[in-house]
Structure formats: structure tokens, C-alpha cells
Image (cartoon, rainbow, N blue to C red):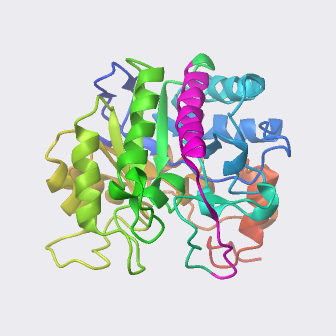
Amino acid sequence: MAVFDPYRFASGLSVKNRLVVAPMTTWSSLPDGQIDPEELPYLRRRAEGGFGTVMTAACCVHPTGMAFHGQWACWDDRFLPSLKAVADEIHAGGAAAVLQIHHGGRQCPPELVHGRPLSASAIASPRANAVVPEEMTEEEVQTMIRAFAEAAARGREAGYDGIEIHGANTYLLQQFVSPHSNRRTDAWGEDRLRFSLAVTDAVLAAVPGFSVGYRFSPEEPETPGLRMADTERLIDALCERPLDFLHISLRDYRQGSLHEEYEGSTLDHVVRYIKGRLPLIGVGSVKTLADAEAVLTMGAELVAIGRVAISEPEWPQRAVEGTVRHRVPVRDLGTVLTVPRGLAEKIEGTPGWFEAEEE
């Protein structure tokens, strides 16, 4: 069964199967950006549950990039013990550990960034109550490029097996790629890929020979906004670099384009466009073993499991048995599913996000 076949990346990193715990926000770290010890059993249990790779929640590379309350951080060497604790727990559970590095840009709540969200341009996000960010100066652009590279080096020092650059989900890197959020007239606007590629090159230079991947969102709903042509240009540029993988961000692996007319799903289209130049991690509402197999059949090399990895820590085993739990026991999230407090509170406070067991 392909889902449980091992995989070896070009960097030499080998994983025991094609199943990845998707990088998911937990809202659970300590106020100073250190990992909360109660989050460690959550990660270890998913590793012990049979997943080949566990990706961490987005780890912030600079104090200006905190996008969530309870986000953890990697912008200074003082975070090395925190970073190492996570890598060690994932390894103890038998999985490869990948650190996702991130800056929230204009998506950062002002109270987390001293009232100064930054972005490519001074254009507010198209969401309720969004504030207008400050356009980054040349000095700030260069600072963020260095911050990503330094964070990657800390990840390697802390014992991770790989790094994922978070260029998706409307955060800072995507804000530079998108025509909605990047309306600069300097070189960083004339070529909207320049910042993301500069970050990628800096990370690769900081950790030569290491496993590095890039996560991207293929489209945005707004106009102007990211379109498939932009993403194809980005894919072409990334495929010219010695990356280990690309990781698409989708709500559902079966979904079609928001704007384009082409045959099949967006995942199908992207796989065909990549043409095997780099391995792809597929994702999006993967709940059953048949879903995971479908993603691999489409041409992705690995498949990331999101919400169902929260509601079913032993998903790989239960998927084979056909006993996956789709409803979460909300009252007992911490004890039954080993979910940290911040994530449990978010699930309890967001009706409809997870199907709950009946009282």
C-alpha cells in the first residue's frame, strides 16, 4: 500500500511512510514564545501514532511576525532549548521532525507586534476589522530575509530533520507574491517573487545539504489577487532550487480552481505542472485511507493529515482498521486526545470546526 511505503528525499532524509502530520496552529505556547511542556505529549503521541513525519505549528522568525496568541518562536538562540524539546519528542515517537518557519505580516494582531503589523505594502487584508499595515522598508526586508535564514539554522542545530518555509495562507511571503498586498514600485514590487525567492535562497545557504521545503497557496479569492499564473511562475522558480519538496495548501484535495477553467482539481493541475521536478505534499480534508491513497494516485509523493490527526492521534493504524474517530470528545480533549489547552479551547469555542460527540 503506497501510503505506508517509505520515502527518501533528495537531501538523503528518509521517512518511514508517506503520512505527514500537517503544520497546525495550537495557540498553546507560553507568552514568551517558548513551547509549553503540555504541548510536548500532543506532538509525541501523533509521532507514536504511526505518522512518518510531524510538522510543527508555524514558528515565528521575528518579533514583528507573531500572528497568533500562543504562537511559539525561533528568532533568538534563547529558544534553542524549546526547539530542541519538540524535535526530541517527535523523534522519541518514531517520526521525522520538520520545523515550519513563519512571519505573519499584515495578518498579525496589532497587540502582538507593538501596534505595527508589517507587509509588502500598506494595504489592509480583505477581512473584517483588518488594520492597515506599514510598508516594509528596505532595511526591514533585509532583516526578515536574515531572520528566516537564522531560524532555519537554529532548527538544524536543535535537531530537526527538515525545515518548511511557510509561504502560504496569506502570510508575509505570500503577501509579497500577491498583487493584492504587494503594490510596491521598487524592485520588491516589480518582481513579486523576489522576496520569497530571496528568503528561500538565504535559507538554503544557511543549511546547505539539509531538507528544506516550501509551502504555497495556489490562489486567492479577491481581485486583484493571486492567480494560477502567479503560482506557476513561483513553482518554476522554486523547482530551479535544491529544495526537497513543495507543499500545497488546500482546504480540500478535490477542490477546483477559484478562477480558472481547467479539467480536474487544483491538485491535479499543480501535479501536472510540476511534472516531477520536485516532490509534492498534498493536503486538504483527507479523512480516510481512501482519501490519502487518492492524493498519492493524483501524483503527490506524500500526504498531509490535518484535523483528523487531532481527532484521531493514531490515525495511521485506525485508518487501516476502518475505525477512525471523526467526532471529537469535546469535554475530554486533553485527556482522551492529548490536546494542549490552547487548542482545546479554540476547538470548544469554534462551533462547527470539528464535529463533536453527542453529550
Query: What's the magenta region?
Result: 128-156
Which one is nearer the viewer's eye here, 60 or 349? 60
Identify the residue at horizontal 73%, vertical 47% (top origin): 338
Which one is nearer the viewer's eye here, 44 or 321? 44
Q: Position of residue 64 (x, y in %)?
A: 70, 49
Which part of the image, by quadrant, shows the C terminus?
A: bottom right
Residue 138 to residue 112: above or below:
above
Identify the residue at horizontal 38%, vertical 22% (top origin): 13
Q: Position of residue 195 (x, y in %)?
A: 43, 46
Q: Is residue 134 magenta?
A: yes
Left or right of residue 248: residue 151: right
Q: Is there any visible trace of residue 332 in the rendered image?
A: no
Which part of the image, by quadrant, shows the N terminus?
A: top left
**In which quadrant of the rendered view does residue 143 lie?**
top right
Q: Is residue 175 magenta?
A: no
Residue farthest along the front direction in this orientation: 186
Residue 180 to residue 342: above or below:
below
Q: Position of residue 218 (x, y in %)?
A: 34, 62
Residue 49 to residue 293: above or below:
above
Identify the residue at horizontal 72%, vertical 57% (top origin): 68
